[in-house]
């Protein structure tokens, strides 16, 4: 069994090696979109893996869907990359939540007179 910590939700789940990161994230009760149903066709299940040492090399699908820079920076597709040991993954921020967070931060700065 491996431990997968899901950020920014700060949830940790125990999963068997070989399980897809998409399944591990869902087991942690976190949301990671997968518009194509996990077929590697949309790229919406992109996540960042903190340590890529224990990961299999990127699949052909990942190499097609992600840039070389993204892969170098630890980005993988949750529907393709498999858990091969303890890992920490960071999920991308939902675009709508990002806009709301930025508006709230701006309002707080305005209240403080910044």
Image: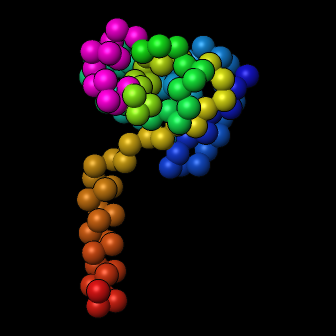
Does the image show residue 33? yes
The region drawn magenta spans 59-71
Instruction: Please state if 65 lies on the left or on the right of 78 as rendered.
Output: left
Q: Quadrant of the N terminus?
A: top right
Instruction: Please state if 107 lies on the left or on the right of 93 as rendered.
Output: left
The answer to whether residue 55 is magenta is no
Which residue is at a point 27% across and 15% down the rendered structure image? 64
Rendering coords of residue 59 (x, y %): 40, 11
Which residue is at a point 29% across and 91% down the rendered structure image? 113
Rendering coords of residue 32 (x, y %): 42, 35
Which residue is at a point 29% across and 86% down the rendered structure image? 114
Q: Main secondary structure of the magenta part?
A: helix
Instruction: Please state if 21 lies on the left or on the right of 41 as rendered.
Output: right
Looking at the picture, does residue 40 appear above or below residue 50?
above
Which residue is at a point 29% across and 65% down the rendered structure image? 102
User: What's the coloring here?
Assistant: rainbow
Asked whether 95 or 83 is in front, the reply is 83
């Amino acid at each position: 069994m491996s431990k997968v910590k899901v950020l920014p939700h700060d949830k940790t789940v125990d999963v068997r090696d070989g399980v897809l990161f998409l399944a591990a994230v869902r087991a942690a009760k976190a949301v990671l979109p997968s518009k194509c149903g996990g077929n590697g066709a949309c790229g919406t299940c992109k996540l960042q893996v903190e340590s890529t040492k224990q990961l299999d090399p990127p699949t052909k699908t990942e190499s097609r869907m992600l840039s070389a820079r993204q892969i170098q920076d630890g980005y993988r597709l949750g529907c393709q990359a498999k858990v091969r040991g303890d890992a920490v993954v960071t999920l991308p921020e939902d675009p709508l939540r990002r806009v709301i967070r930025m508006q709230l931060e701006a309002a707080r700065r305005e209240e403080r007179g910044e």
